[in-house]
Amino acid sequence: MGNAFCCVQVDQSTVAIRERFGKFDEVLDPGCHCVPWLLGCQIAGNLSLRLQQLDVRCETKTKDNVFVNVVASVQYRALAKKASDAFYKLSNTRTQIQAYVFDVIRASVPKLDLDDVFEQKNDIAKAVEEELEKAMSAYGYEIVQTLIVDIEPDVHVKRAMNEINAAARLRVAANEKAEAEKIVQIKRAEGEAESKYLAGVGIARQRQAIVDGLRDSVLGFSENVPGTTAKDILDMVLITQYFDTMKEIGASSKSSSVFIPHGPGAVQDIATQIRNGLLQASSH
């Protein structure tokens, strides 16, 4: 702002307070104005209309006895229509705003637990804004917005909260891992049961095929070789199966061998035991 030849310049977004013989006279808007000092006029001071921000850090205690630092950001500006009130009624605007913020925060936070403070920080900010708007409007200031930008518990409390959260997440992870292992075991058991069932079906079909093959062999041999009995044919089939089994045991180097009586007479003994078993089963 210049002052030459009784002219003054008021910058943009600023107003000047003109007094005459020490008494408020007029609010000067941005531009060039005449201030005849010979007539007792003078510029008492300037007032910025720009948006300003004040960060207030307030320490308080929650309902569950945890000390926290609450940081509130207050955005405010002077009203051009009430510039005289803003200039004359308050000597320190920032200190006045800080006092109201302390009052509201220290009245609101002790009613809440620590977790609720984090969840209801918007409600706390709204309460601060409403109280400031009601108080500061009488002094020519507008409260544009109030934000709770940070809530800082004691470092030991913060560490404990992190440990509780980590333990809860580990518990959830353990449950999920156990459920996954349970599903794998169930699927493995279902697969084994299905495999055993199919293996049983295969063995049953194999035995049925062997029985059908023996029946066909007996019938075909009886038709082609007259005078043979079913006993003769069965003995021949058993001998053939016996030699096939011995051949497979000898051909495999990794097979587990069971030593049994060997010789043509042994086959007759085996056949006799099979026939006796079948006859006893039929009698019962």
Image (spheres, rainbow, N blue to C red):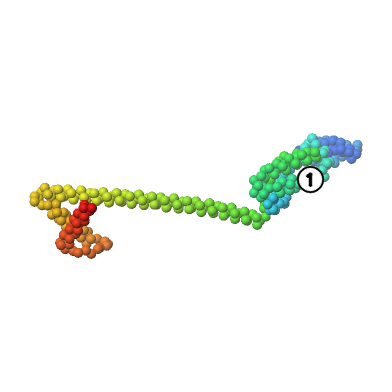
* Residue 147 as seen in the image, left or right of residue 189: right
Q: Which residue is mark 1?
A: 96
Which quadrant of the view contains residue 245? Answer: bottom left
Q: Is residue 194 above or below residue 33?
A: below
Q: Is residue 162 above or below residue 42?
A: below
Q: Horizontal and vertical percent for residue 284? A: 23, 53
What residue is at 19 percent from the left and 64 percent from the top?
261
Q: Is residue 1 visible?
A: no
- Local packing at callout 1 (Cα closer than 10 Å; few below 14, some 14-19, many 20+) is some
- Viewport quadrant of the N terminus: top right
Q: Horizontal and vertical percent for residue 83? A: 80, 38
The count of marks equals: 1
* Residue 154 as seen in the image, left or right of residue 186: right
* Residue 228 as seen in the image, left or right of residue 127: left
Q: Is residue 135 visible?
A: yes
What residue is at 75 percent from the left and 39 percent from the top?
133
> Quick one: SS at disc 1?
helix
What residue is at 79 percent from the left and 35 percent from the top?
81
Q: Horizontal and vertical percent for residue 127? A: 72, 42
* Residue 281 as seen in the image, left or right of residue 78: left
Front position in the image: 183 or 207: 207
